[in-house]
Amino acid sequence: MATSIYEFAQLPRLEAGPGRTRRARRVRAAGETPVVGVIYNPRSHRNRGADLDCSISPHVHIAQPGDRSQLLEALADLAARDIDLLVINGGDGTVRDVLTCGAALFGESWPPIAVLPKGKTNALTIDLGVPKDWSLQAAIEALDSGGIVRRRPMAIESLDDPGTSPVHGFIFGAGAFTTATRAGQVSHRLGAFNSLAVGATALWALAQSVFATRNNPWRKGARMAIRLGANGAPMAHSGKGDPAFRQALFASTLERLPAGLVPFGKLRHGLKLVAVDQISRRTTLSVPAIMRGYGVAGLRERGIHQIAAAQFTLDIEDQFILDGEAFPAGRYRIGQGPELEFVTP
């Protein structure tokens, strides 16, 4: 379920018709066997050549959509079955696609969701504390015996084409983040995944930023304008480098990130972002300490802005990345989607 650039206009749309209204969440009777829907992405990294690890059951309904157009139909079928648990078998990109396509079906009444970490990157499951070997059977059992973690994904709307559906995801980045994501594909080809890939990419990005000139993509970043809140107040700029550019932008609603990174400082809950101006080499050398959560004085004056916001708008002249996939340049509003319940062990 991937393309080279994810175009908003290409999102599958929910057409009106029988069985296509948003459904209220079903209340399961005590002791009743849960009805489980599974979205299984056979293209996910750890799913290649592997079979599902749960015996066939009339209460478990498995869908293997081949692309995004089929994903919408698969989710509509599961919604019509009044499922008690939705299992997403795939990586962060699969989660993004399921949440995006399912928004029109479930609205604010999503069933509990379990995510099996089967992708190259699984930032969401790291935040949830899900083990790498979590199985489908274990996820089903956890619906009654495990825990619940609540998270709200980011909801990203195109302001250039307001008629298109918003996209939902958890890891947003632009500027050097886009450059680093491309470099991360090299890490994947070399066999580094999850926290190892994040750590290797971060070290490479740091080295490039220390030795590069301001015209190098790692330090130049991207031309962008960031406005905060519903009133659209312009984000402050430190004056380091060109004020029309930000070296990097990163946003997320997750509370724990891969490789132990803490880019938002003491901020934990809700939508958080960190914007980096074209900082000096000296400040760049402090980035490892900052990313580990150590206090460094005068961050905003140095060009590093850690902010919590209900929403923000972004006008950007370069691609940005959402959960590992590139989206086109343009004007966007980034807010928060519905609160979701994620099943944990």
Image (cartoon, helix red, strand yellow):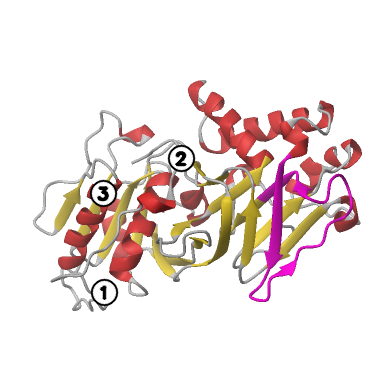
Q: The residue under label 2 is which amino acid type?
A: Ile
Q: Which circle marks residue 5 in the picture?
A: 2
| Distance of label 3 from label 1 (alpha carbons) | 19 Å
Can you see residue 165?
yes
| Distance of label 2 from label 3 (alpha carbons) | 16 Å
Nearest the camera: 213 or 140?
Answer: 213
Quadrant assignment, res 100: bottom left
Residue at image position (23%, 45%) is 65
| Distance of label 2 from label 1 (alpha carbons) | 29 Å
In this rendering, would 337 be left or right of 221?
left
Task: Give the magenta part as a residue range.
Answer: 221-249
Which residue lies most toward the left here? 58
Q: Which circle marks residue 331 in the picture?
A: none
Q: The residue under label 3 is which amino acid type?
A: Ser
Q: Position of residue 232 (x, y in %)?
A: 68, 71
Q: Is residue 232 above or below residue 98?
A: below
Between disc 3 and disc 1, whose residue precedes? Answer: 1
Residue at image position (48%, 52%) is 124
Q: Which residue does the numbered mark 3 point to in the structure image? A: 69
Q: Position of residue 312 (x, y in %)?
A: 63, 65
Within-10-Å neighbours for mark 3: few <14, some 14–19, many 20+: some
The residue tagged with tag 3: helix, strand or loop?
helix
Between disc 2 and disc 1, whose residue precedes? Answer: 2
Q: Which residue does the numbered mark 1 point to in the structure image? A: 22
Within-10-Å neighbours for mark 2: few <14, some 14–19, many 20+: few
Q: The residue under label 1 is which amino acid type?
A: Arg
Residue at image position (42%, 42%) is 132
Disc 3 + disc 1, Cβ < 8 Å: no
Can you see residue 199?
no
Q: Is residue 295 above or below residue 323?
A: below
